[in-house]
Image: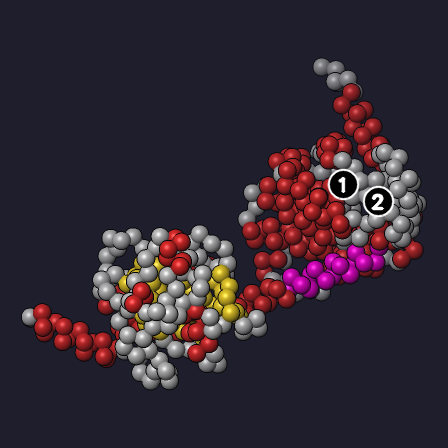
């Protein structure tokens, strides 16, 4: 077959696979649209090596099917954008690609997948991607610098050279544009209609995957806001511990990460931290807001909040990966020596997440002011918590506290505005809280000192 015959067959294949029924005003030959000022294709993901091999039609189809299968299994938007960008560079044999999403509430186009930058955001209608998001038209620019509407400033700033651009809309199930593909610098020449047909195949599956991921994200945000609202509701009842649940949650997150937990495990600990005192919603105000030490009967009544936490949280339908949260929240007053409450569980039977929340709970009780004590400095806090390790707190968790000390210290400073203030109901005055260690904390240190100074047993 001659070269002329090959070119003729290629044109026929291109015509056969080209998209039918372009939208009004879609690309005509040589059409170019203005790029966003300050937006450049080098702020993208999925860059391929210059020597990347081109793929055959059969390989392209196989890749589209493989990518489609993977798209259906990814629900994290950032991971999804990166997967789509990488697939675009392979399928179109181009240098770089970015996948933008459309936020119709804010009327912005945005992407987290960009090399060397953070999140990109700009209004719908601005630049090539913004125009495609607004009109739903395909824009194929064969020679960027030959078009007076192209903005070369980003290239000059970064040293990158934009030659060709293909920008393609991603349309959702109701016909609304949900995203935009932007491919840059096809190898061997400008993008063809065959490339547009290829991107059309990917865009159909990608739109479904994006809408699914957005639905999952919306459900996650709803769940998170519900849990945070429950925590705020409890804290609002008691000015003495205002902001306590939020602070415990942040400290627990820091400690969990210092223990090497995964993101999913940290999120479980975080949720347990927010809900650890939810049972206090059932405690009467005259006990919860009492300014001063509780007597034995009052303290026994107050301890019931741990059981109430478990009881109330059983009514919530937790996601499968959060099923341990009620247990973790309810066990945060258990002790390693089995003398805690509500169940009196020994250390090995206490959920690790509960042991982390317990340490974060104590950490906040010591570093924030209470009606019976001032805010303790970090060195005194660590001394007291060290005295509680083994009997009360998990020694491994205390080790993690020490490893995360700098981050915990920064978090304390960040959260100081949430501390209860002198003059708040039940807090007393600065003078009343300035007497150094509280009675219970002095007792804890005295008990530890006695234990460490006792003579060793006779051999």
Direction from residue 136 to residue 233 in the image, left or right:
right
At 85% across and 34% down in the image, what residue appears? 437
Q: Is residue 205 visible?
A: no
In the rendered view, would you say 451 is above or below 238? above
The segment highlighted magenta reads 223-238
Residue 322 visible, this orientation: yes
Q: Position of residue 379 (x, y in %)?
A: 73, 32
Q: Badge 2: few (under 14), some or many (20 or more) residues near its Cα, within 10 Å? A: many
Q: Residue at x 40, y 67 (%)?
A: 35
Q: Is residue 39 above or below residue 332?
A: below
Q: Which residue is mark 1?
A: 367
Residue 9, relative to residue 374: is it above or below? Answer: below
Q: Residue at x 43, y 69 (%)?
A: 127
Where is residue 42 shown, x and y percent of the image? 38, 57
Q: Position of residue 409 (x, y in %)?
A: 68, 40
Q: Is residue 182 left or right of residue 318?
A: left
Instruction: Tell me the quarter of the image containing the C terminus.
Output: top right
Asked if the magenta segment contains residue 148, the reply would be no
Q: CA distance from mark 1 to mark 2?
A: 9 Å
Asked if residue 145 lies left or right of residue 214, the reply is left
Kindly indicate whether the residue at mark 2 contacts the one at mark 1 (C-beta within 8 angstroms).
no
Q: Residue at x 40, y 54 (%)?
A: 157
The mark found on residue 370 in the picture is 2
């Amino acid at each position: 077959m001659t070269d002329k015959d090959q070119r003729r067959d290629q044109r026929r294949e291109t015509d056969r696979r080209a998209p039918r029924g372009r939208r009004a005003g879609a690309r005509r030959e040589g059409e170019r649209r203005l790029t966003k000022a300050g937006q450049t294709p080098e702020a993208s993901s999925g860059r391929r090596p210059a020597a990347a091999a081109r793929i055959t039609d059969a390989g392209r189809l196989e890749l589209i099917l493989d990518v489609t299968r993977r798209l259906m299994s990814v629900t994290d938007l950032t991971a999804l954008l990166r997967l789509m960008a990488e697939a675009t560079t392979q399928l179109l044999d181009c240098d770089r690609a970015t996948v933008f999403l459309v936020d119709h509430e804010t009327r912005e186009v945005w992407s987290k997948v960009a090399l060397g930058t953070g999140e990109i955001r700009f209004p719908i209608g601005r630049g090539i991607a913004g125009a495609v998001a607004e009109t739903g038209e395909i824009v194929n620019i064969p020679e960027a610098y030959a078009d007076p509407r192209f903005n070369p400033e980003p290239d000059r700033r970064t040293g990158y050279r934009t030659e060709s651009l293909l920008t393609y809309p991603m349309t959702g199930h109701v016909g609304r544009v949900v995203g935009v593909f932007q491919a840059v610098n096809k190898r061997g020449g400008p993008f063809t209609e065959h490339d547009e047909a290829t991107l059309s195949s990917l865009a159909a599956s990608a739109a479904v995957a994006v809408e699914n991921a957005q639905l999952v994200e919306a459900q996650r945000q709803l769940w998170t806001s519900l849990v945070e609202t429950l925590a705020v509701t409890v804290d609002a009842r008691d000015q003495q511990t205002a902001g306590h649940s939020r602070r415990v949650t942040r400290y627990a997150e820091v400690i969990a990460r210092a223990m090497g937990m995964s993101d999913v495990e940290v999120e479980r600990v975080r949720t347990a931290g927010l809900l650890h005192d939810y049972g206090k919603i059932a405690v009467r105000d005259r006990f919860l807001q009492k300014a001063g030490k509780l007597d034995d009967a009052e303290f026994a009544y107050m301890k019931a909040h741990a059981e109430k936490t478990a009881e109330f949280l059983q009514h919530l339908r937790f996601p499968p990966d959060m099923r341990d949260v009620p247990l973790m929240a309810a066990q945060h007053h258990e002790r390693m020596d089995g003398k805690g409450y509500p169940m009196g569980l020994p250390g090995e039977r206490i959920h690790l997440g509960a042991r982390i929340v317990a340490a974060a709970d104590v950490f906040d009780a010591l570093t924030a002011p209470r009606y019976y004590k001032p805010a303790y400095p970090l060195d005194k806090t660590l001394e007291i918590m060290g005295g509680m390790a083994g009997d009360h707190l998990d020694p491994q968790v205390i080790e993690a506290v020490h490893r995360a000390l700098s981050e915990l210290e920064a978090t304390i400073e960040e959260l100081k505005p949430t501390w209860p203030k002198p003059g708040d109901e039940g807090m007393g005055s600065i003078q009343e809280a300035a007497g150094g260690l509280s009675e219970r904390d002095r007792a804890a240190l005295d008990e530890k000192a006695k234990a460490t100074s006792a003579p060793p047993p006779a051999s």
